[in-house]
Amino acid sequence: MATRRQFLERLALGLAVAACQTHVAQPAEKAVYVGVETSATTGLSTASFFSASGSRVSSIYLGFRAHGFAQQGNHLVVFPRRPGNRFAIIDLGSFEILSVVTAPKDRHFYGHGAFTADGRTFLATENNLASLGGSIGVYELDRSARRVGEIDLPLAGPHEIVRAGPSDRFLIALGGLQTHPDYGRAAFNLPTFRSQVISLNFASGTFDAFDFWSGTEGVSLRHLAMDDKGRIYVGGQKKDMARARTAQVAWYVDGQIVKPIEISDLTDGYVSSVAARGTQALITSKETGRVVHLDGDNVLRSEEIDGASAAALGDPFGIVSGYGTLCIGEKRVGVRDGQEFDNHGLLIKI
Amino acid sequence: MRILTTIAFLSYTATAGAISVFSDDEATLLQQGLRTTADEFIVPSYAAYADASSSLQTSLKAYCNDGGTIGAVHEDFAAMFLAWQRASIVQIGPVADAEGPLRIQMWPDPKGFSRRAVMSAVKNADDALLEKDGLSGRSIALINLTALELLLYGDLVPASYECDLSLAITSFQADLAEEMVDQWSVGGTYRTAYDTAFTGNDIYPDIDSLLRDVLAGGVVYVDRIRKFKLLRGLGSSPGMARPERTEAQRSSLGLKSIEVSFRALRDFYETPLGLFDVAPDMDGSIEYFVLGETAGSIADSLASIDAPMAEIAREDGERAKELRRFAELILYHESFFKTGFSRSIGLSAGFTSADGD
């Protein structure tokens, strides 16, 4: 007779599988996904590579707490969680760390980056510790990475950056909060901060701002993705309870139309990750353990996985993870002992 | 058929809410322990902070009106400062609102934000800061204990702007303390959510999430003792001490602050029938008792040292060596809060949204 805990573990397995309703049609044993497993004891991460069948292809200990990824060909850049100041470049052919690059003095990373269309340069979101302003570090990639420039941003706290389409136009979520690692995660401008999404034309170095959206007062916008129709999905976190009137933290942009996505009850003031592909998007929330499937602002369905965090959508499959479970199609992969899956993951092509 | 099955399954999960790893009996037991910890440790700790800040208001009013002594002011500040060191083991509830615990003590402050905020306020002598609620929404650098210590242990002249600003900061802290006592008292807004976590509510979908937050707060607390209160000034080995980086140098309360923190750890663990004390009834770890006793012994050792922390760092001798050893022992507490306790009761540690990005 199963104990209650065994029953719940089986139930969690069922939920986890149900949360991943996409199918896998890839040859086994080739890495298709990279996620982060972080030690609950040390807080340090491993980049873990999985095949479409759910097998572990490789694990690379990083020595810092990892956050987001960016891939270009055989190179994978693993960015650290704020306020980490090192990123790693991994060779996807040999699964070796080619180099670990340290941020300049008075800078730290915010956890995300994106490659230019030609793949020779990538942009990383950074904090300027002298001014507490946001900036973009510009890096040229070879076996290592060389910092070749910097772009000042109009607001503090840049977080996720994604390339929007085939040109070098980038979307950046500016969280708006001024922080300094010497003061933990406290924000110095909490009562007054604003957050917005901007578009960077990398070639010209110019920005287009998406204005400040009504209802984003007190909300820090952190994650975003664009689907193949050019529709943008944005997720934030409720930070200033005095100004954030509702638990609304997700928005959708289609051309000139900006709308809140009505999933407050499914995200409860916190979006962990946003992913988009084709005509669909995924939004996850650790607060509620929900994985929300969207087509524009239409909620298609939602499922539950304990500690819903990483989400990745590709062709033809999607992958999500919670604290202890990674779902690859019908496969359920448990996290390594003493570890937890962290906020982000990436479908990779090798 | 497969699709129909899936839909049925999902519609069940949509109404089932969060999934706790605990049985109803286990959740009830843990909830009882948490309530007792709140009643016997948390509420009294906040009440002590509220009382001490109220006393400082009284002695400051007297001093600023030429009717009291600076000695009485310093004595009341010490009580308030140390009461906060004890209460700050609690990192959940109203203290986590807005900018969080830095609203009460912004230290370390390597950029000198508090010093700059105080200098700017004094230079501008803005009377608006002195009005009731005049500090609401102002920079946390100005409203916290570090700023207050700078003012009280400078040349505080009665009937001066500095005196009035000190009183305004103390009053702000007293209001904050009262708010925390109210919210934590039975029937208070936060306390109601805390007390009902085992059945789920808007803040805590299950008791698992509350436990994760409580334990995460413990990690922050012991990490702060080790990295900041001990090693920031002493360095990790002889020759690396930096006396100017120790806590509360002006008031010389740095060492007492560490002693109080260790004693708070002991009392937090050993609250009779509190969270850690009831957990062994469901096979939870009994390690808490050993850790509590060790913390108490360290507090006793610290109480016997009669020297400011900055002097110990400057000397960088046997006493510094002993304190560095205490810093190493703290790692056992960190491990217990991070994984030891949670694993013993079958709970995954859970990187929560509180540490998310």
Image (tube, grey):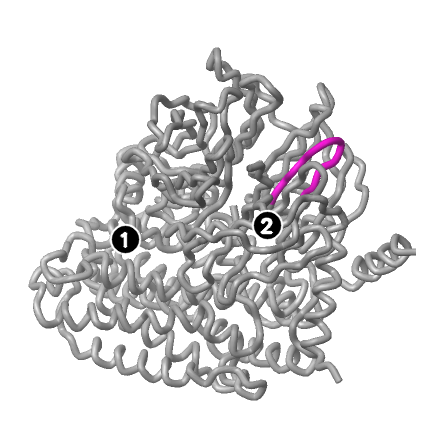
Marks 1 and 2: in contact by CB < 8 Å?
no
| Horizontal side of residue A89 vs A326, given as left or right | left
Which residue is depicted at the point 88% across and 56% down?
A: B2
Question: Circle 1 is placed at which residue position?
Answer: B64
Disc 2 with disc 1 on a shared chain: no
Question: Circle 2 is placed at which residue position?
Answer: A29
Q: Position of residue A7 (x, y in %)?
A: 73, 75
Q: In the rendered image, which quarter contains the C terminus of chain A? A: top right
Would residue A297 be counted in the magenta stretch? no
Q: In the rendered image, which quarter contains the N terminus of chain A? A: bottom right
Q: Where B141 falls versus A72 (above or below)? A: below
Residue lying at the far bottom of the rendered structure: B281
Mark toward the viewer: 2 or 1: 2
Would residue A275 be counted in the magenta stretch? yes
Q: Where B158 falls versus B22 (above or below)? A: above
| Horizontal side of residue A45 vs B244, given as left or right | right
Amino acid on which the number 2 mark rests in the picture: Glu
Which residue is depicted at the point 67% across and 40% down?
A: A313
Cα distance between the residues tagged 2 and 1: 76 Å
Query: In the image, which residues are magenta?
Result: A273-283
| Horizontal side of residue B177 vs A209, given as left or right | left
Pick whichever, A258 or A285, lies toward us: A285
Q: Position of residue A6 (x, y in %)?
A: 69, 76
